[in-house]
Image (cartoon, grey):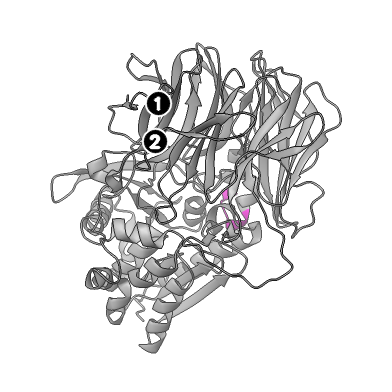
Amino acid sequence: MVRQVQPADLSLYTAISEPSFSPDGRSIAISARRANLDSDQYDSDVWVVDAEGRGATKFTEGRRDFDPLYSPDGRSILFLSRRNFARDEKGTALYVVPSNGGEARLVAKMKDVIEEPRWSPDSTYVYFLSFDVKESKDDVKVIRRFSFWYNGTGYIHDRRKHLFRADVRSGSVTQLTKGEFDLHGVAVSNDGSRVAYLAHVQELRPYVSDLFVMSARGGKARRLTSSNMELSALAWSSDDRQLVVSGNDFPRGFASHDRLWLFHLDGTRPELIDSVDRNKANTLNSDVRAKAHGPHTVVWEKGMIYYIQAEGGSAHLYRRALDGKPELVVGGDRSVEGYDVRGENVAYVSMDETHPEELFVKRATEVRLTSFNVDLHRNVNIIPSNHFSFRASDGQDVEGWVMLPGGSGKCPGVLYIHGGPKTSFGHSFMHEFQAFAGRGYAVIFINPRGSDGYSEEFADIRGRYGTRDYDDLMEGLDAALKLFPRIDGSRLGVAGGSYGGYMTNWVVCHTDRFRAAVTDRSISNWVTMWTVSDIGPHFTTDQIGGDPWTNEEKLLSDSPLRYASRVRTPLLLVHSLEDYRCPFPEGIQLYTALKYMKRTAELVLFPGENHDLSRTGKPRHRVARLNHYLRWFDRYLKRAATRRG
């Protein structure tokens, strides 16, 4: 019998890595990851999928293997792994296994993460990013850097992320870059002689990226930019004379869209080759992908540049020639989660709001190659969402969705606000929403001003948090209640995380229409956010409009903490103790204020978790988090009488 989705059903979903084509295009390597509630970890193994649709074969049994990549000669597959690691041991290993089967061989083991592995064209080296960890027997931290911790990474005051090269034959590892800067992107030239990379070299502006090119053997690098851009992904042209890079030069601060830029190695000024006013990234919210956030990649294959573009509630795959117009490759109401290209063939991972990730290939037509999540609908009732749009009071069209629970009677509703603010809701799978609907709640989710997927102007709410975005949310809620009369307007809750947590705090400080609220990894005070968050100084200055010394009143007037005395809505505050993006004092300040004022509030703290708890936290903690949400809403929204704090 098909039953309703429950929080513990997190373990039913399989998440898939970005695909990797074999050189002949006949096979595709992926990793498949699933939450294991018994071990409180994630099981992940490498699979090889026949590109003609003849089936998928599990290729490793390490249970901690992920992110495979075919070698250019097709003889090997590299993958990252944490097999044979102690539970609390840090680090990542890089293995290579023959593509026709056999024993995996350890090539390199680092004491921290390994990211962005890239084969050399002759299949003899693997380039990757990792931290140059400095050994210390002293646990006292002496900090001199401006940026000293980072969410999901921890303290970074004594280490930098650099480029390394592993010799596949000997297993020797060479560090190719050194210095007081951090890398976050790498691409090897097609002839193997050079490596391009992106690096943060501005200590006080860590959001700025520069593009460098150096010999593949190391040495002095040449900088092609002027420390005036934010860059995200890069790819070489087939003749190695040019690089295409996605990024922006801050025309609207952090609300700016990434676009495509062409860099010439002859020193010619870079060209903006993209005129489409949409972000070149997947910023859709989902809690069933393998990583915390959607992909942000560029591929240059056979004269065509491939990229993902945010469009409303979808993330589509496009391609274009340098002198041509954009061509839609993979469209529809869906989220493209990763892709690879071999000739005219495209392999990609895709999901939508009722189907978690599967692997597809597109030639003349689209063919689904895997069935990891196909049986899901046979076991649990996956509820579709209903799209709606409304005309805001200032004339702007705004999109939203409503997920209605089964049955026909009146039901309570939860307005859920996304983070960012420059992310979006839409055609991506949300286990959290399915669990709410499974418990009998309608879920209302809207892309208010500030969201991605639309124009830069739409995304730009700098200095206006809690104004137009708040109006969009309240007006969108009113529109949903009219369009979907099953939702009981007298039994409404509100919830959200990160920026959505900030807005939840703001909402309960400015209206009493909600009977309960849950604020997650939130912001309550922009002054403390500025001073303690890993992105606080630049994000707060850009988005709110100043720092605590030049515009203190603006930061305080935009802080929910100032209005805590107005709160009458019972508020549950959820926070992770190792969240360095919105550190837990943000939740504690508001909780303490509410308790002092004798309001109804609870605080739930998760040890060992960071800002990405809802997406990549320990499986049991993720289930516990949802159970706390539902406990709170059940208490206040499923009773006939209204309770106030």
For the residue pair 70 and 521, the one nearer the viewer reads as 70
- Label 2 sits on a secondary structure element that is loop
For the residue pair 256 and 240, the one nearer the viewer reads as 240
For the residue pair 543 and 9, the one nearer the viewer reads as 543
Using the image, determine if residue 360 lies above or below residue 60. above
**Seen in the image, is 10 located left or right of residue 392?**
right
Using the image, determine if residue 215 lies above or below residue 178. above
Estimate the x, y position of residue 329 in percent, counting from the top left: 43, 20
Using the image, determine if residue 39 lies above or below residue 576. above
Residue 93's image quarter?
Answer: top right
Structural crowding at the residue carrying mark 1, measured as other residues with C-alpha within 10 Å and reported as few (<14), some (14–19) or many (≥20): many
- Label 1 sits on a secondary structure element that is strand
Could you tell me the amino acid type at mark 2?
Thr
Disc number placed over residue 428 in the picture, else none: none
Residue 535 appearing in the image: yes
Which residue shows up at 67% across the image and 45% down it? 34
Estimate the x, y position of residue 85 in percent, counting from the top left: 79, 52
Residue 637 appearing in the image: no
Residue occupied by mark 2: 225
Q: CA distance from mark 1 to mark 2?
A: 9 Å
Q: The C terminus appears in which quarter of the rendering?
A: bottom left
The segment highlighted magenta reads 3-8
Q: Earlier in the sequence, mark 1 or mark 2?
A: 2
Q: Is residue 5 magenta?
A: yes
Estimate the x, y position of residue 218 in percent, counting from the top left: 62, 33
Could you tell me the amino acid type at mark 1?
Phe
Check whether the beta carbons of the residues at disc 1 and disc 2 lie within 8 A of each other: yes
Disc number placed over residue 263 in the picture, else none: 1
Residue 595's image quarter?
Answer: bottom left
